[in-house]
Each structure stands twice: as structure tokens, then as C-alpha cells.
Image: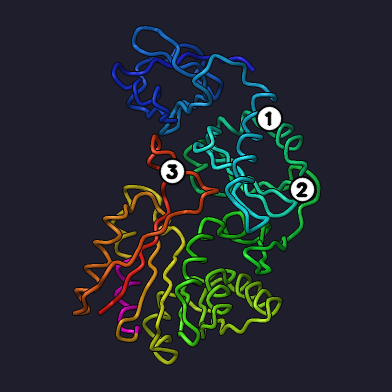
Amino acid sequence: MKPEAVVKIVEGREKKIKTFYPWVQKEEVRRVEGPKKVCLATLEDFNGEQIAIGTYNPISRFPFRVLTLEDEPIDQAFFERKFRTAFELREKLVTDTNAWRAVFSEADQIPGLIIDKYGDHLVVQVRSAGMEMLKPLWLPALIAVSGAESILEKSEMAGRKEEGLEPVAGPLHGTPPDSVEFNETGLAMTALIQDGLKTGYYLDQRSARRELAAKIRPGDKVLDAFCYTGGFSLYAARAGADVTAVDIHGGALAAADRQAQANDLSVDFVEANAFDYLVEGAEDKGPFDWIILDPPAIAKTAQKRDSLKWGVWKLVHAAIPLLKPGGRMLVCSCSYQLSLQKLLDVCRLAAGDNGKQIFVEGVTYQDLDHPAPLSFPESLYLKGVWLRVD
């Protein structure tokens, strides 16, 4: 496939692209030559020098997304090389599971495409119109390189609307099952790939789950709010904790209970809204040595940052009185819009409003199969702060 358009970038903005930043924002486009439609395009600087080849979408907040800084054809072989590089990297980085993020969009120089691997099955999310256009090239490449038994598309995220795309879900290859069993650090896990959240499981918290298990002492009382299919809960229970796990998603709780039984572990699962449960129901189960607050993304855009901060404040403020003296919390945010410093500030305010002092004991980020290049700060989206409350 050959470029059909030329995107001229505003003078001075080309440096960040040359140093591996993958997006050109709308206000950085000086002029476009060629069709005003979703297509392949070349990116040129103020002097007409070609900088990159990528996808162009005139209605996107990021009209140009970089595929390559080289002058090379964008074809099936191009994507086969990209996939092999991404897959080989995960095989080196991830050693204790057969499920991982195989492709992480811009961080793997395949902008707008997420691929999660659960055993022999893949789940993909197409997040940009450019990658939707290129599906006839990347899908056969993915089938050839992965050898996957099935590939399921779950492109249902709200961000597709900004790209001019409708939500889409369905099989792309083979017959995807409803769920996939996999192993993570010796635990039997389940990904609800058809009806679950995201691609079926939260792969990005693997390192935090290991960290929690290492810190737990037998007999600790743990509250896992927003437990989903029980990742943190099962790690804590295996370490000897008395675990209460809460989620509003009944199907996820049923899967979590099955996983607990499969691993011969005991967890008290509660179907409830975690925000309400922290205020009205958790006191009877506490006080707790540990509270895990890992909510889904409350807000994804800068315009909704205040609601995100307010949501985290409510959770932390409600959780602190439920802790034993010296109790500890893991507070997570999976939104790039809430920086580490802002997350710490919200926790500090919530502690102060409770008349408590709070201490930072550590920080974790997404696991290594979700690479975070420094040239693309937006890729470092997940952060968890480990806190001790005086």
C-alpha cells in the first residue's frame, strides 16, 4: 500500500517525531496535500524533507500516527517484521505465565493496535481508523506469525468514536472460546475474553500482584475492592491472607470464585458497588491490614481529570478508617491523565481529611509486557502507590 497524502508539519515540531514520538496533533498540521480521508501518508518538515510514513485521519485529535521513520513499503511483510519483534521481546521479558500483552500499540510502533495473548488465543483491539484501514495487511501477518488457534476482536472502546469508527466485536480467525484458562506464577487463571472487561483480564498488574504476595503475612486481613476476576485476591489468599473481595460485575465474581476453587483457595467474594461497600458494608469485615484500590479508568481525558481525582479521593478517604493502626494500601490509577504526583497529592489530601499521616513505601508501574518508551510519556499510564497509614 502506497501513501496517498502528504502531511506538512508545523516548523519546529518535527524534532519530537525524529526522536520517536508517534503522534502529530491536529494543531501541529500545517497543510495536507492529497485526499482528506483515512489513508497512508508521508510526513514532511517545513523544508519538504520526508520524516516518516504513517496513517492519516483528518478528523482525529492525532491526524498523523507514525508507522516508520524509514522510507519503506507498508505491506504484509512490514507487519510480519513488527509482530516478530514484539513477540520475541515478550518471550524474553515474561517467564512466569503463558498470557501477556503481545503488542502495545505505539510502544511497539504499531499505533492503534492492542494484542493480548492468552495461551493459544489472541484478543485484539483496533483503536484508530488508520489501523482499521490496514487490517487486510496486518491480520494475515498476525495469523502467520502467531500461529494462534483463534483471534477475537474486542474493539468496543469509546475512543473509536473520535476516530469515526463504530464499536466492533467478533471473531477474526478461528472460533474464539467464551473464556481462556491460563497460568500466572503457578495460579490457574481465567480470561473472560468474550464478555469480560478490556480483553478479559488485567495483564498489566502482574508485577503488583507479585509484590503484594511478597508483602503479605499469613493471617493478614485483606480487602480487595474492584477485584474483577480475583487477581490480587488469589495472590493474597495463596500467601495466607484472609481475603474479602468486592466487585459489581457478577459474571467476573463467578469466574473469580471458580478460580479460587480451582486453586484450592478460600476468598469471601461480595457482589457490590465498591464505592458504596467501603462506606456501608466493609466495616463488619474489618479492620484490615491491607486494602487494594484498583478501580477501572474513571476518566481517560484531561477534561475529566477532576472527576478522576474526586473518585480516587472518595475511595481513599473511605478506606483509611477501615485499616488497622499501621495498615497499608495499594492505590492504583490506570489513567495517564492522573500523574504519579497528582495521585500522591489526592492520597495525601484524603489522609489529612481523616486526620491521619500517610507514608509512601513504594511505587509500581505496568509490567514489562506493556513497554513504556521515554519518548512517548503517554505509554506509562499505570501507577500504583504503596502506602502506610499512621
Label 1 residue SS: helix
- The image quadrant that residue 32 belongs to is top left
The answer to whether marks 1 and 3 mark residues whose Cβ atoms lie closer than 8 Å is no
Label 1 environment density (alpha carbons within 10 Å; few <14, some 14–19, many ≥20): many
Label 3 environment density (alpha carbons within 10 Å; few <14, some 14–19, many ≥20): some
Please tell me whether mark 2 or mark 3 is closer to you in this view. 3
Report the disc number at residue 379.
3
Q: Earlier in the sequence, mark 2 or mark 3?
A: 2
- Distance (Cα) linking label 2 and label 3: 27 Å
Part of the protein shown in magenta: 312-323
Please tell me whether mark 1 or mark 2 is closer to you in this view. 1
Label 2 residue SS: strand
**Above-or-below relation of 143 to 296:** above
Residue at the image position 52 percent from the left and 34 percent from the top: 111
Q: Earlier in the sequence, mark 1 or mark 3?
A: 1
Report the disc number at residue 150.
2
Q: Which residue is mark 1?
A: 80
Residue type pointed to by label 2: Ser
Report the disc number at residue 346.
none
Q: Does the magenta segment cover residue 371?
A: no
Magenta stretch, main secondary structure class: helix
Q: Earlier in the sequence, mark 1 or mark 2?
A: 1
